[in-house]
Image: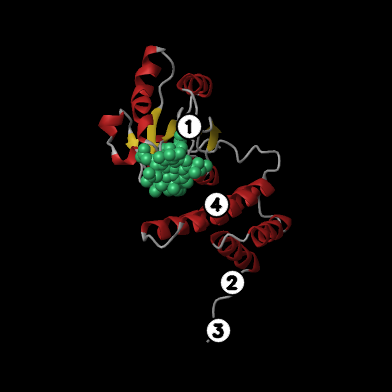
Amino acid sequence: MTGATIHPLTETMNSLVEAIIVGDCAQSINHARNLFDSGISAEEIVVNGIEVAMGQLDEKCTMEQFNLLEIMLTGRAAMEVIKYLFPSGQIVTARKGTIVLAVLEGDVHDIGKNILKMILTASGYRVVDCGKNCPIEKLLDVISEEKPLAVGLSGLIFPVIPMVKQVRELMHERGIYAPKIMAGGAALRQSSTDNLNVDFLAGTAFDSIGYLEQLSGGKVNE
Ligand code: B12
């Protein structure tokens, strides 16, 4: 009995997924280059390579079969492929909309936010990153300017909680466009959506994908 023939490009795509999962940047870029040179579009590589790898990482996270180093290495390999595919920095089109991210003033933890940024980017969102230690005023200005689908706040230390609670109120006070608010990170996820005055509280970065799909009703700006 002969097995089904696997198309060489499918094999290369599978190898790309594996290389990203094990965090091998050089191999990841090699496979991405081979695919690209064979006529596979950057977007297809994102959807069928990076997004698939992120899905597998998500499964590992759910089963708690991961460690921080592994997440960071996988994240770095995915970011390297994205940088290779989109050298100008204009990562994918805002296929699914814009998301503004921030870690508010006083908090310098940004590893989780950076992972979230990578996952959102790899999933087809345009991310505007306000960075860590971000003053609320700066965040409000960016929201007003970008009119995003949602804003994502990451918080690792308890002292940022009062600031997170104010964001919605301040958006209304200033009469600016008020998108849905997602929150996450070790300190915030111990609270509740009501207490934080946010719309969605995530356990992991991947949780945001399902929530955002609901928000956009699966609509894609193409
Ligand atoms: C690494 C780390 C640091 C690094 C940060 C490096 C960096 N660039 O981020 C350094 C060394 C700088 C640091 C400094 C400090 N730290 Co520190 N740090 C940590 C540590 C060990 C890991 C945090 C981390 O990166 N986790 C891994 C990431 C991947 O997880 P994550 O952020 O939760 O993100 C995941 C999800 O939550 C989700 N997510 C995150 N945000 C969001 C947002 C949205 C919208 C969504 C959808 C999802 C999402 O996505 C990620 C992947 O799924 C934690 C301990 C811990 N267990 O959390 C302490 C910890 C956060 N630190 C702590 C403290 C106290 C400090 C210091 C004040 C220490 C000091 N005394 O100087 C300082 C300064 C802090 C400041 N002003 O901000 C405390 C906070 C206590 C509290 N709750 O208030 C902790 C909990 C340690 C402890 N047990 O005491 N720290």
Disc 3 marks a residue whose amino acid type is Thr
Residue 207 coordinates in the image, percent (x, y): 38, 46
Q: Does the numbered disc 3 mark a residue whose Cβ is under 8 Å from ligand 1?
A: no
Marks 1 & 2, CB-CB < 8 Å contact:
no
**Compared with residue 7, is residue 218 higher up or lower down, i.e. above or below?**
above
User: Which sits in the foreground, 147 or 71?
Assistant: 71
Q: Residue at x 64, y 49 (%)?
A: 42
Q: Earlier in the sequence, mark 1 or mark 4?
A: 4
* Residue 106 lies in quadrant: top left
Quarter of image, ligand 1: top left
> How far is the residue under mark 1 from the one under mark 4?
18 Å
**Residue 219 seen in render:** no
Q: Residue at x 36, y 61 (%)?
A: 63
> How far is the residue under mark 1 from the one under mark 3?
54 Å
Q: Earlier in the sequence, mark 1 or mark 2?
A: 2
| Circle 3 residue | 2
Residue 115 coordinates in the image, percent (x, y): 50, 46
Task: In the rendered structure, find residue 75 and report the number of the disc placed on it.
Answer: 4
> How far is the residue under mark 4 from the one under mark 2?
28 Å
Task: In the rendered structure, find residue 6 and report the number of the disc placed on it.
Answer: 2
Residue 161 coordinates in the image, percent (x, y): 34, 30
Task: In the rendered structure, find residue 102 and report the number of the disc placed on it.
Answer: 1
Disc 1 marks a residue whose amino acid type is Ala
Disc 2 marks a residue whose amino acid type is Ile
Q: Earlier in the sequence, mark 4 or mark 2?
A: 2
For discs 4 and 2, the disc positioned in front in the rendered view: 4
